[in-house]
Image: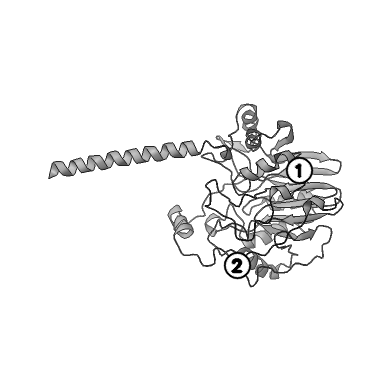
Amino acid sequence: MKNKILRILKKTMIVTVILAITLIITTLLYMRQDQFGKAPNGARLERIKQSPNFKNGKFQNLRHTPTLTEGYNYFGVIYENYFKSKPRHYPTDKVPSMKVDLLNLPIDRDVLIWFGHSSYFMQIDGKRILVDPVFSGNASPIPRTVKSFNGTDVYAADDLPEIDYLFISHDHYDHVDYQTLLALKNKTKNVICGLGVGSHFEHWGYEKSKIIERDWYEKVELDSGFTAFVEPARHFSGRAFSTNNTLWASYVLKTPSMTIYIGGDSGYDTHYAEIGKKYNPIDLAILDNGQYNKAWKYIHNLPEDVLKAAQDLKAKRILPVHSSKFALAAHPWDEPLVKLTELNKSYNIPLVTPMIGEIVNLDDESQQFKQWWVGQK
């Protein structure tokens, strides 16, 4: 009997080892796909090593930034996000949207079109600008795992005109979408991104001359009257198994007629006040408001942080993004806009809250928006 048990245990161990090795090999082979991009190397890596923000082999935030807030642990976060019941995590109704013919939009109109989450198109002073486009319907490298909400995929890459400036805040999958960027390659004149992010674009066939990589506190003279200032954010980066080998960033875009803050993903910190002092006034601040959790408050704004950030930035108006398309946190799908609107009663900062596809007139500070999420299930 004892020998029989030992044989069974031995066979079980062998099967377990074989399965583990198979899983590892399968994962490694899967991660070799083009969609995972390419880590910086060669001259690009040497430039990265010269950055004051690159220490001990990784980019660092301005201040110590724990991945998890004190008092939280990974087991609790995994349980909350993957096992605990989450009422209204996904909308049961089709998310309201509209569609504008961007290909025939008069070039003299200064507008913004939000595509959901952190993707949006701007037309300002005759230039066309695109930020963090995701049109594949998935915010994950694994198919059908982080699907977009019903009704949010009304736009595709084919609906966009030629893009003068494509801004990339960081290389996470919900901001750098491989399928979308391949489709936009021949329409994109210039890519502006943080150090190292250009490695992905070059790997995907973008011409090196089109890729403009910068460090925090550097600027890019784009055209007459157009300047992009690269500023910090409090976040992180990474694709595949690599983390923080490319730089995350926010941007201040100055055009002949206005100043726009492109916030990217960020937790609240002192950088907002510093940016506000440098570029006051900011006509529109586009800020991360969604997919948040108190467990990771250092890397994503909570709704109350968005309003504090807007005050620090001295922003005339706020466009809250990073919501209404993907479920990447445990909160109800509409909570970011519900909470922000309620909290703003104490701040009274004009909110720009268009439905997906609705035209925002950038030169009309009095434009009003319906609370389109109210009554949606």
Q: Residue at x 78, y 67 (%)?
A: 368
Left or right: 264 in relation to 4? right
User: Would you identify the image quadrant in which residue 285 lies?
Assistant: bottom right
Could you say which is closer to the camera, residue 350 or residue 168?
168
Picture coordinates of residue 80, whole percent (x, y): 47, 60
Residue 153 occupies quadrant = bottom right
Numbered circle sitting on residue 273: none
Q: Which quarter of the figure has residue 301?
A: bottom right
Residue 72 position in % (x across, y down): 47, 56
Amino acid type of disc 2? Asp
Q: Secondary structure at mark 2?
A: loop
Q: How many marks?
A: 2
To which residue does mark 1 refer? 165
- State the CA–CA distance, disc 1 to disc 2: 35 Å
Q: Is residue 170 visible?
A: no
Quarter of the image where the N terminus is located: top left
| Mark 1, secondary structure of its residue | strand
Give the answer, above or below, for where 194 lies relative to 46.
below
Task: Give x and y (percent) for residue 157.
Answer: 70, 47
**Measured from the top left, where is residue 317 in percent x and y?**
76, 60
Q: Nearer the viewer, residue 352 or 139?
A: 139
Which residue position holds label 2? 93
Furthest toward the bottom, the residue is: 375
Q: Residues within 10 Å of mark 1 (few under 14, many from 20)?
A: some
The answer to whether any part of residue 44 appears in the image is yes
Residue 154 shown left or right of residue 227 in the figure: left
For the point 40% across and 40% down, the residue is 23
The residue closer to the viewer here, 69 or 7, is 7
In which quadrant will I find the C terminus? bottom right
Q: Amino acid at mark 1?
A: Tyr
